[in-house]
């Protein structure tokens, strides 16, 4: 190597390699000169190599790295947004954009200034302007508003709950308030926000005179149930029910204010319409739905709800009669309608003053179940504050005020919805019966209203869990995630000190079933928290938050020699997690689970692009992160098993690297004989020449045979002399590697580099109890599996080594440190790239 050229090679190696005898081919690759060598004697390794120029590093500034986690989650889950690699004290704008189901665009943006390290962390840093200000981790969602030039009176509501709300988040230079479409973003990422968790079932209901949609949580049930009633606008509104089912409640979104329900009017809709929904339910009402819920709870002889949640409503209504009679009574006060300066309707005075006539309001003194009242103090549609106060006084006089809990929020308006939904101060409204279209003022100020939504939803879920019939439930707090992200599993509503088995099951693409299970005992509150509690046996033991994945094994009776590998990376790994009574080792299919949940594990984050590569004689797949690029590149080469293995490259792209999974060992012996280092060179050049790849920052990632290839490319010698390496090198070693002498090889490499004076470049991670196949974390440990040594040869069972728990620990720790190593040496280099997490 010509040291005067200033070229550097950066490498990560998992399982070290010893010296190999080689022949030398010299080639020139764009910016740098590379010696490509052909190895004859190989050691199984995993190596990651990067080439970049010292001189260019000093000339080019670091560029933005946009990180968002998770980018696939429920709508009520928080995400974190960070921007790295900015210049110090740099003005930037973070911008979020949604294309709604109605075809309208909604946006939010915040103005930030990077700190002395070039970092903006939305969770900690203050927005200095935009659609929100101050420290607001979720401001990019709840402060959304229609883009300039949109139709007036819009309200953002999800209609198709089986599809996600897709949010594009971008970072721009400077403080901008408009013209985002005309400007090139420095970096972008996509996040999906779901109302329906994996496994939630949607059922249309049209029987018994009832029109609605039933949402069922995953698993066999039985589950707590809710009747979900919206307000006077009518129609079938599903998204809140879908979200409640995602939290373990059977929820029926009921349509009761439209012609389909009432044959053109609400005149015949009375108590019996709602009684078909059963007698063991909670009722959740918003606006006029609150009036219905209160009336049913007090006067129905059939429904005996366990609890009520009443949002932005009132107990003031005509006690006897149909819904039409209720509206007729309200309309008697139409003269009290007011309008603001923009001619928006204010209806809150229609029910004021609160009547003293007992026939004109629900006698809440007769209430027998707990009631949660949620009130916005700036509600311009209903006198929610006055109604809550009157209800309190009525219940105090009746001696049942202990059943009432009131949450009152200053600055909140009428439309208090699930959290992180955009605040709607005013919107179009169709008057039931007349079909008159108005713009109604709902009230509220954006920031306090949004904080009310977040706080009240959390307390609503806790209230429902506390008061509904307690059946056993298992919850995964991360239903949608990248493969290398942790999840949290909690089982609630068990008897105290109850023995249970938590069981996970996955059907692979090869149709084989894999399972793991752990034994637990519930605490005094009837709860098991996998992140904190100890498993007393099963496929794993001790406190092991990810044991339900990392300890998976083929179910009894499966084919021998299986290895778990994902082939179709554009679909998730679906895992069913169930809880069973007692400590079980087998027979899970024959037993009824107490509760179940489904989680999806993805290699590809939203927005990652998959491109087939067939040009230049090269066969591979390129995975590109979301955003405009250019991105650091990784050439990903697997080992002697051959074939095209994509999942690691897909996961690297989800972390912001343009990764090409290269097929270079072919099962066809004739074709395999034609493959030489010129083939790897062509792949390297293709990656360099791609418009979205930073040509002077290409990494080599190799496992097994691929590692030897990578090492050969990283040095300039007739033999693989690691003493010639001039870049940082990370070795990852499993001390129980039964396939190769990994520990001995690592020690020999260390000695060679010490003699050469470059041992400061070497970092070795050595893991006791880890075997040969060290992969991304939470994949099942494979101690042995079938393997074909050469095309046409008989399969053998290869022992890779490793003990399950220790190997899983090594995979988790090494992957985290590999990504950190990459970011340290790549992300502070010369080109912008994006990091995207699920």
Image: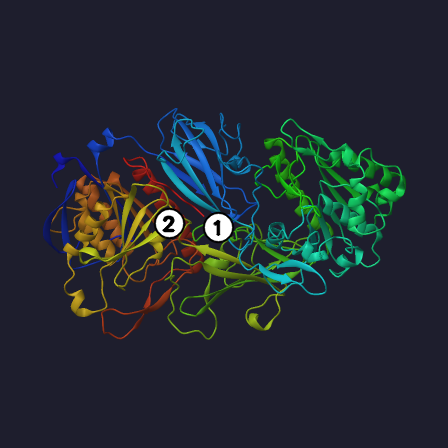
Number of the label disc, if any, that sits on residue 486: 1
Mark closer to the chain start, 1 or 2: 1
Q: Is residue 322 left or right of residue 772?
A: right
Residue 775 x %, y %: 36, 55
Q: Residues within 10 Å of mark 2 (few under 14, many from 20)?
A: many
Residue at image coords 21%, 54% = 708
Vertical position of residue 370 compared to residue 218: above or below: above
- Coordinates of residue 416 in the picture (x, y in percent): 65, 40
* Picture layout, residue 509 above or below residue 438: below
Front one among 591 and 91: 91
Q: Tell me if mark 1 has few (under 14), some (14-19) or many (20+) residues whose alpha carbon lies within 10 angstroms of its own.
A: some
Whole-percent x, y for residue 432 in the image: 70, 47
Secondary structure of the residue carrying tag 2 is: loop
Q: x and y percent of residue 311 in the render? A: 71, 42
Tally of marks: 2
At a point 42% along the width and 40% down the height, the residue shown is 67
The residue to which callout 2 is attached is: 608
Render colour scheme: rainbow
Relative to the observer, which residue lies in front, 111 or 317? 317
- Judge by depth and name the residue closer to the eye, 500 or 152: 152
Which residue is at 43% across, 70% downward?
511
Give the secondary structure at mark 1. loop
Is any atom of residue 472 visible in this view?
no
1 vs 2, front mark: 2
Where is the N terminus found, in terms of image quarters? Answer: top left
Q: Picture quarter containing residue 782?
A: bottom left
Residue 196 quadrant: bottom right
């Amino acid at each position: 190597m010509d040291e005067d050229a200033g070229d550097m090679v950066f490498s990560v190696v998992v399982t070290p390699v010893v010296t190999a005898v080689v022949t030398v081919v010299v080639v020139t690759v764009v910016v740098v000169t590379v010696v490509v060598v052909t190895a004859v004697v190989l050691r199984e390794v995993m190596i990651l190599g990067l080439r970049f120029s010292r001189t260019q590093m000093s000339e080019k500034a670091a560029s933005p790295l946009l990180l968002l986690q998770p980018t696939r989650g429920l709508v009520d889950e928080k995400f974190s947004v960070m921007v790295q690699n900015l210049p110090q004290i740099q003005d930037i704008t973070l911008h979020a954009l949604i294309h709604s189901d109605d075809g309208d665009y909604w946006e939010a943006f915040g103005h930030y200034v990077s700190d002395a390290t070039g970092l903006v962390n939305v969770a900690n840093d203050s927005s200095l302007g935009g659609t929100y200000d101050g420290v607001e981790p979720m401001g990019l969602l709840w402060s959304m508003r229609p883009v300039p030039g949109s139709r007036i009176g819009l309200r953002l509501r999800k209609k198709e709950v089986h599809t996600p709300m897709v949010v594009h988040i971008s970072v721009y230079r400077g403080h901008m308030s408009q013209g985002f479409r005309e400007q090139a973003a420095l970096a972008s990422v996509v996040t999906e926000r779901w109302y329906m968790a994996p496994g939630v079932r949607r059922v249309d209901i049209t029987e018994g005179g009832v029109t609605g949609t039933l949402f069922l949580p995953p698993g066999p049930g039985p589950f707590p149930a809710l009747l979900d009633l919206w307000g006077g606008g009518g129609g079938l509104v599903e998204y809140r029910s879908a979200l409640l089912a995602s939290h373990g409640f059977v929820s029926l979104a009921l349509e009761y204010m439209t012609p389909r329900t009432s044959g053109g009017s609400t005149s015949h809709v009375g108590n019996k319409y709602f009684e078909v929904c059963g007698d063991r339910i909670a009722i959740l009402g918003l606006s006029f739905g609150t009036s219905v819920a209160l009336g049913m709870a007090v006067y129905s002889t059939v429904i005996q709800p366990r609890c009520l949640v009443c949002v932005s409503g009132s107990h003031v209504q005509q006690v006897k009669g149909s819904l039409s009679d209720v509206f007729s009574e309200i309309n008697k006060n139409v003269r009290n309608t007011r309008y603001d300066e923009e001619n928006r309707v204010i209806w809150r005075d229609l029910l004021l003053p609160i009547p003293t006539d007992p026939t004109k309001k629900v006698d809440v003194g007769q209430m027998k179940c707990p009631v949660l009242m949620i009130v916005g103090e700036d509600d311009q549609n209903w006198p929610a504050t006055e109604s809550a106060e009157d209800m309190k006084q009525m219940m105090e006089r009746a001696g049942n005020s202990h059943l009432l809990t009131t949450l009152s929020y200053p600055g909140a308006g009428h439309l208090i919805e699930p959290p992180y939904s955009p605040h709607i101060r005013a919107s179009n409204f169709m008057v039931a019966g007349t079909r008159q279209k108005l713009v109604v003022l709902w009230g509220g100020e954006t920031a306090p209203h949004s904080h009310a939504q977040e706080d009240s939803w959390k307390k609503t879920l806790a209230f429902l869990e506390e008061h509904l019939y307690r059946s056993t439930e298992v919850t995964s707090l991360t239903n949608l995630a990248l493969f290398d992200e942790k999840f949290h599993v909690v089982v609630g509503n068990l008897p105290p000190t109850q023995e249970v088995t938590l069981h996970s099951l996955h059907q692979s693409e090869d149709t084989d079933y894999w399972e793991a299970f752990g034994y637990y005992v519930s605490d005094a509150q009837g709860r098991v928290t996998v992140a904190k509690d100890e498993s007393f046996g099963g496929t794993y033991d001790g406190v092991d938050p990810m044991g339900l994945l990392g300890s998976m094994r083929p179910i009894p009776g499966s084919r021998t020699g299986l290895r778990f590998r994902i082939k179709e990376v554009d679909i998730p790994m679906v895992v069913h997690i169930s809880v069973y009574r007692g400590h079980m080792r087998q027979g899970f299919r024959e037993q009824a689970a107490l509760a179940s949940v489904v989680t999806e594990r993805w290699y590809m984050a939203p927005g990652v692009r998959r491109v087939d590569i067939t040009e230049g004689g090269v066969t591979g797949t390129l995975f590109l992160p979301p955003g405009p690029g250019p991105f650091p590149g990784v050439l990903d080469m697997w080992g002697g098993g051959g074939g095209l293995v994509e999942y690691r490259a897909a996961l690297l792209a989800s972390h912001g690297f343009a990764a090409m999974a290269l097929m270079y060992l072919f099962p066809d012996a004739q074709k395999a004989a034609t493959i030489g280092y010129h083939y790897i060179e062509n792949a390297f050049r293709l990656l360099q020449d791609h418009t979205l790849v930073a040509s002077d920052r290409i990494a080599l990632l190799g496992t097994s045979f691929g590692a030897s290839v990578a090492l050969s490319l990283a040095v300039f010698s007739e033999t693989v002399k690691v003493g010639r390496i001039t870049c940082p090198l990370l070795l990852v070693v499993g001390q129980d590697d039964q396939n190769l002498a990994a520990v001995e090889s690592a020690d020999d490499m260390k000695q060679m580099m010490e003699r050469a004076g470059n041992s400061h470049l070497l970092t070795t991670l050595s893991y006791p109890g880890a075997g040969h196949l060290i992969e991304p974390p939470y994949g099942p440990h494979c101690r042995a599996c079938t393997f074909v040594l050469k095309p046409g040869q008989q399969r053998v069972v290869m022992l890779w080594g490793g003990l399950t728990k220790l190997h899983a620990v090594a995979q988790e720790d090494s992957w985290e440190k590999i990504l950190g190593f990459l970011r340290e040496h790549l992300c502070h280099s010369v080109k912008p790239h994006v990091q995207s997490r699920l």
